[in-house]
Image (cartoon, rainbow, N blue to C red):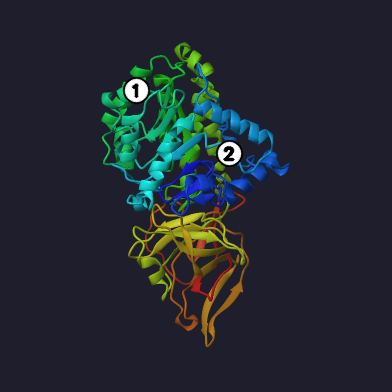
Amino acid sequence: MIIGADGNVSPCSYYQGFGNSQPFIGNVNDTSIAEVWNGEGYQRLRSFMLSEEGKNGCSGCLAMAQELMGSPFLPSAERPCAATDNVELMMREVAERKTIIQAKPGRLSYTPSQRCNFRCSFCYQDYDHSLSLKSMRRVDGEVLELVPFLVQVIAGGGEPFVLPVWQRFLRDYSLERNPVLSFATTTNGSLVNEKLLEKLAIFPSVAINFSLDARDEALFGKLRIHSKPAEVFRNVRRCLERRGDFTNPNFLVSACMTVMKSNLAEVLPMFRLMLEWQITIGFSPLNVYPLHESVVCFNNPHRELAEMRRVRADFDRFREEELHSRPEYEEFITRAGVEGFIKHIEVLWDLIPWDLESTPHYHVRGAIPPGVEADFSHRSPLVVGFFPYDGERLDRPRYFSRLRPEGWDVWLPEGRFALGHAPANVNPSAAGNVHGEVVDYNWVVRVERADDGIMLVGYDRTPAPCHGPDLVGMVDEADNGFSQDMTGVAQPPDGPDDDRPSGEETHTTPAEDGQEHRAPVSLLVRFKRFAGIGR
């Protein structure tokens, strides 16, 4: 059971993230842990997992692709205790196909608050670090009452070691209360000092996972604001000394890296660090928000994907030529299952939409449609998202632009898009009634004004450009919305962003004989306000 700071309960950390959007099981702000545990949500989940369909219920999840689903943790003890009895009861009830069970949760991850001493630039919690359970005192008490029955407790945050409930838990825990309890946490590493390690040494087993998003200390500090990178790395080494050999089953030290555009080039240095320190490192792709860091959302896909391909080539070369060239790493590579963590990186490469490299994109610049500014102005800092839209449903945003005083600036393919706001660390959402279309007519379009708006006159069909023209927009007051009717001059993705002329223009395309010739091209790009769009 996973309890978040908003009170929402889920059975898995991938349940609401990494492309999944399952409904929450319940909420402990409104009901007790015991009521949620046997409530409608968990009953439905158990029924599903017991069904024929449920046998493959997790097959499409990123956790399965990364091979993160292991065997259940079954504790051993010299004599039976409440925790081992609880495990045996749960296994019997599952075998009996019960959906309402007497057994209590065996594993509990608890995040009572998002309070943290860092301000990571990409963190989903950064938008509201003040978020805490409304019924924290009651739920804290319920969690502590469950301790004798648990085989594993996972301390969540924010930063777990700044939260009072975990400070109290570490102070009061004893083997007499639960002789098999495993303690696990993910920490930013800033508070893992010798005093804390002495407290953790009491547990039969400990698993400490450090959030490390770059080996380069300058980049680390930029991503993890208020951090002291040298101090964090020193604390990791302190844990490694406490652990001793990497095969120690009772003191596990690992790390996780959130892979995004800013630190993609750090994947290889972090993998080298895994070998040098002999710790496993999980590589989790950032594929939702913030949009400007997502590995599946682009402002200029040709430019960004070229850099991603270079990083991938460097890693592939390391894997083929260097990975097994150091004899001192071979035991760790074999026994720690390092090839499995390469799987994480392969999943990352598979997520990236490489097909966009061969898709024509057009440079489009514009402003927020008149009358829609209120939908965006209360959000800051702001990124504008462009959501593919087929007329009935919205897809996740695939393109973005930072919103500056002069407006937005992005490379888009042909297609319809809804416009939406995407504050840095909040799930992006479309404005609801603002959408537009990028259309390559493959001919020159002369824009003429008519009483009922805009009339298009087209002629001279030509091949579509690969990188498209640079476009500028105009406001169409007659349409009471925002229209961009544009032609322009072709510009490579990393060319200068200078002012482009409006009106009928040409772009350069390669001729069959290798010479260049001038050929006309034009697009119509419209972003305007509509009564509403489907979701």
**Circle 2 SS class:** loop
Q: Residue at x 60, y 63 (%)?
A: 393
From the image, tell me which residue sits under label 1: 239
Residue 465 locus on image (x, y percent): 56, 57
Q: Which mark is residue 195?
A: none
Q: Quadrant of the C terminus?
A: bottom right
Is 13 left or right of 138, judged from the image as shown?
right
Q: Is residue 111 visible?
A: no
Residue 31 locus on image (x, y percent): 48, 52
From the image, tell me which residue sits under label 2: 102
Q: Earlier in the sequence, mark 2 or mark 1?
A: 2
Q: Residue at x 34, y 18 (%)?
A: 242
Pointer 1 local density, CA inside 10 Å: few below 14, some 14–19, many at least 20:
many
Task: Check disc 1 and give the amino acid type.
Answer: Cys
Rendered image quadrant of residue 256:
top left
Q: Residue at x 54, y 49 (%)?
A: 25
Task: Check disc 2 and give the amino acid type.
Answer: Gln
**Residue nearer the viewer, 494 or 47:** 47
Q: How far, Cα to Cα, is label 2 from label 1?
A: 38 Å
